[in-house]
């Protein structure tokens, strides 16, 4: 079992948050400069199809900013069409001759996971301890805002995670889902994944699982409660 006693040590929390702040800025800059420009029209079209989002033709006119954010995030990290997710396709090229800072960022991106979280308790100003339903264990998500908008009532948050040392940070949109962890089981069955934790998904399984999760949440109107990393 992971030891979370460090969350009671303010100095350690501040050190972690400083590391998180620097890493979030670096990852966002890197994605903007290296990955976003590699998202093709085909990537967007296939993401829209998977997520059942109407883009009103190839002009990509979205009904909401939320739809656009969800689609970009899916194309970057999850879409297994067109040779795989953009981050997975482009990372080997960027790794050639890369400096230490770039290699560290590529390592972070290579360990992206999509999962369902149930918040347990917040550490004010730092983040939230959550049960990761795919891992089957508690994780700590560093995000100052999450403690204010994640309800500690057993409801699920669907999101992508990137590692920050032994902790994690969200990337893209954190999508609330007012269902229960039991709702995840038929989705796992549909993609051919074992329900026994820790659950490891292949790239195609992860794409299907995330798409099914997002489509289900959108159908229930959860997009209106979306939050951003």
Image (cartoon, grey):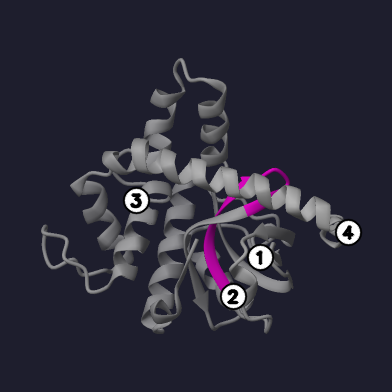
Q: What's the CA distance linking mark 2 and mark 1?
A: 9 Å
Q: Give the range drawn in magenta.
A: 156-168
Q: Name the residue under label 2.
A: 156
Which residue is tagged 1? 133
Local crowd size for mark 2, using a 10 Å CA cut-off: few (<14), some (14–19), many (≥20): many
The reply to whether callout 2 and callout 1 are in contact (CB within 8 Å) is yes
Question: Residue 7 or 14: which is nearer the viewer?
Answer: 14
Q: Residue at horizontal 52%, vertical 78%?
A: 177
**Lower sequence index among marks 1 and 4:** 4
| Cα–Cα gap, marks 1 and 4 | 22 Å
Which residue, given by chain and number where applicable, does mark 3 sit on?
A: 75
What residue is pinned by disc 4?
5
> Is-magenta flag for residue 222?
no
Return the disc, 3 or 1, that comes first in the chain's sequence: 3
Q: Is mark 1 on a helix, strand or loop?
A: loop
**Above or below — where is 138 with respect to 149?**
above
- Tell me what residue is drawn at x 37 percent, y 32 percent: 90
């Amino acid at each position: 079992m992971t030891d979370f006693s460090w969350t009671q040590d303010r100095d350690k929390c501040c050190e972690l948050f400083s590391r998180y702040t620097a890493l979030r800025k670096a990852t966002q800059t890197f994605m903007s400069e290296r990955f976003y420009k590699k998202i093709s029209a085909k990537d967007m079209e296939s993401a829209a199809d998977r997520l059942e989002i109407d883009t009103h033709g190839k002009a990509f006119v979205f009904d909401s900013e939320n739809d656009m954010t969800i689609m970009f995030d899916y194309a970057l990290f999850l879409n297994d069409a067109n040779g795989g997710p953009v981050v997975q396709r482009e990372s080997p090229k960027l790794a050639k001759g890369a400096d230490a800072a770039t290699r560290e960022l590529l390592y972070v991106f290579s360990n992206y996971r999509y999962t369902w979280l149930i918040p347990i308790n917040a550490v004010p100003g730092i983040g939230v301890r959550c049960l990761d339903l795919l891992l089957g264990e508690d994780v700590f998500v560093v995000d100052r805002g999450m403690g204010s908008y994640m309800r500690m009532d057993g409801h699920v948050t669907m999101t992508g995670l990137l590692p920050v040392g032994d902790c994690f940070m969200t990337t893209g949109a954190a999508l609330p889902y007012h269902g229960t962890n039991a709702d995840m089981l038929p989705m796992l069955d549909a993609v051919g994944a074992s329900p026994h934790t820790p659950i490891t998904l292949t790239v195609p399984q992860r794409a299907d699982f995330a798409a099914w999760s997002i489509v289900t949440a959108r159908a229930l109107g959860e997009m209106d409660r979306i939050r951003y990393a």
